[in-house]
Amino acid sequence: MARRLFFLNLLLSFISAATQAQSQPAAAPPPAAAACNGILLSYAYTGGAQLPPTLTTDPTHQPYKFQSTLTILNNGLAELKSWMIFVGFQHDEYLVSASNAVLADGTSLPAGVGNGTIFSGYPSTDLKTAIETAGDMTQMSVQINLVGTQFGVGSPNIPMPANISLVNDGFVCPKPTLQGKSEMQTCCTEDQNFKTNLTSNNDFLPRQNGDLTIMYDVIRTYDSNYWAQVTISNNNPLGRLDNWKLSWDWMEDEFIYTMKGAYPYVVDSSDCIFGKQGQYYQQMDFSNVLNCERTPTLIDLPPQMANDTNLGLIPFCCRNGTILPPSMDPSKSTSAFQINVYKMPPNLNRTQLTPPQNWNINGTLNPDYKCGPPVRVSPSEFPNPNSLLSQTTAFASWQVVCNITQPKGESPKCCVSFSAYYNESIIPCKTCACGCPSSTSSRTCSTNSPALLLPSQALLVPFDNRTDLAIAWADLKHLPKPNPLPCGDNCGVSINWHLYTDYSGGWTARITIFNWDGTPFVDWFAAVELNKAAPGFENAYSFNGTELNNNTIFMQGNPGLNYLVAESDGANPSKDPRVPGKQQSVISFTKKNTPGINVAGGDGFPTRVYFNGEECSLPTLLPTGNAYRKKGSTLIISALVAVVIFVLMQL
């Protein structure tokens, strides 16, 4: 009996101790957190090791593994929605994995982040306050465990970033301070001077502006799947997409069952059949599933599918992937489609909705876009499908903002040549303006030599056929001829800006657009930025020209002339060079609104030129007046060029 009482008392002691242990509050945050009444950011290096190979002769490129923990703690009075944090990596870091976060620019891991990068939250995007959670650290904070490779910083040195800061609008972050050698911290507080014109309610962040915005609206939802409408809107007056391709990353093993208004670039359900989706949906006929890739690529449908009962009948769909700028045609500045998404456990609940991450969109001969993370915004409203005056609200909405960017090392896709009435030579597009052959073994031209000046007739001849003309012109003008000769511009589209006349009351220019590609351009547009001359714009005689607010003249084809044909064969393909598609117009300017303008001195030449939204490469030189064209020399030059062309045609 005594032994039973002993074991009973011992058991009660254990139960009491366990109960007291469970009732203890969560561990208090570190002392630095208590002193921060805003958003505390910390970056702690937790370990690393040298990686093979061993580069004893080049220690600056020696690879090392690094592991770090990035922590965000909300000690403020307001919930931090859609948090984003910048980490100023500075050792050519190559990030392999990051928990609880994705890269905000849409890049999938692994990825190079050596110039710094921005993280955004996933799956948790918002951090609540201590007040509304009674100090629950799991809702107030997030830890991002980073694993990657850095170069050149070995033990005992520690590869710390140059900076950490909160990217969200309305916050000020002081320079971080080091806590020892392996941790840095900063406390970001609300900027009292920050003001915004964007409106929102307390539940959602305001919708942002950008060159391109994408809405992901869930319009129907069920336990195992949902329907979402994706709407792409172009907001940039010079932005454009042709044959757009949209991609993203599924984060929860979702897959695309069917679509309306767009289609996968690759129709493939094999990843589902051999993956966990096939194991869970055993009764599903996966031959009807459109795509099971983790990173699907989606494309628009052709116009003839717009009224198809199975794939079309979606407003703003089916335009071959063309999205025009709103300044050109507002009705064609939007594209939309609907997608049926199937989910996987444990997300089988109609309220469990998660948007895809890492959005990317691009087109052909168009600007490059960088897209941010999807941000939860107030539900979108749509016209009632029953033609009633009421509006239908989405169940959930996310906004993705994309902005035009110029990737480092990326070549333009179009180029510009300059010419003028006072100089007989054409300043051509720059050598390798749109890139050069990557293989040095097959290259027979110089990538560094400047392009040879040309006679005006050479603009109509493809680069491969104008060598003799360029050499003859160089001989006539006593110009240097490098050996080997410079490479071509390799551009699919080139634009010639010719200063046509200059008189006391005004001046004129002629713009010619050449299409050297095998694809025509429908609804093309061009734009020129003239910093001093734009206010004097009067008329574009063969184009529809308008002046925008930023010293830019926007031009498009008149009705019936908005089609820039592709390059085609000459009259005799066996002898004649190929002929580019061409559109041309004279543009007139008055000097009344631009007193003191020096047209020939440079004010009459554009500082930026765009074609279909893509910024073109410009020459670094302007025509000079040293070789003013005289009547006698013009006859000699014309005769010489005619002889060269005749010889070429006889070959």
Image (spheres, helix red, strand yellow):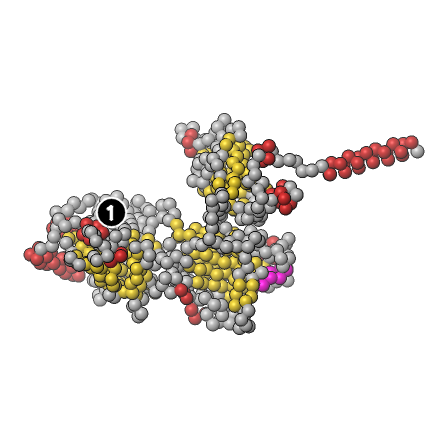
Question: Camera-side residue: 80 or 398?
Answer: 80
Residue at position x 12%, y 52% in the image: 628
Q: Quadrant of the C terminus?
A: bottom left
Residue at position x 50%, y 58% in the image: 215
For the residue marked with disc 1, what is the amino acid? Thr
Residue 612 versus residue 46 in the image, above or below: below
Q: Which residue bears the numbered disc 1? A: 620
Residue at position x 60%, y 62% in the image: 221
Which percent across, then down, holds residue 644?
14, 57
Residue 236 versus residue 31 in the image, above or below: below
Residue found at the very far front of the displayed protein: 193
Q: Quadrant of the N terminus?
A: top right
Residue 296 versus residue 68 in the image, above or below: below
Residue found at the very far top of the displayed protein: 156
Tell me the element at label 1.
loop
Which percent across, then down, holds residue 135?
64, 41
Which percent across, then down, holds residue 38?
55, 40
- Say how many tags the image has: 1
Provide the residue span drawn in magenta: 219-225
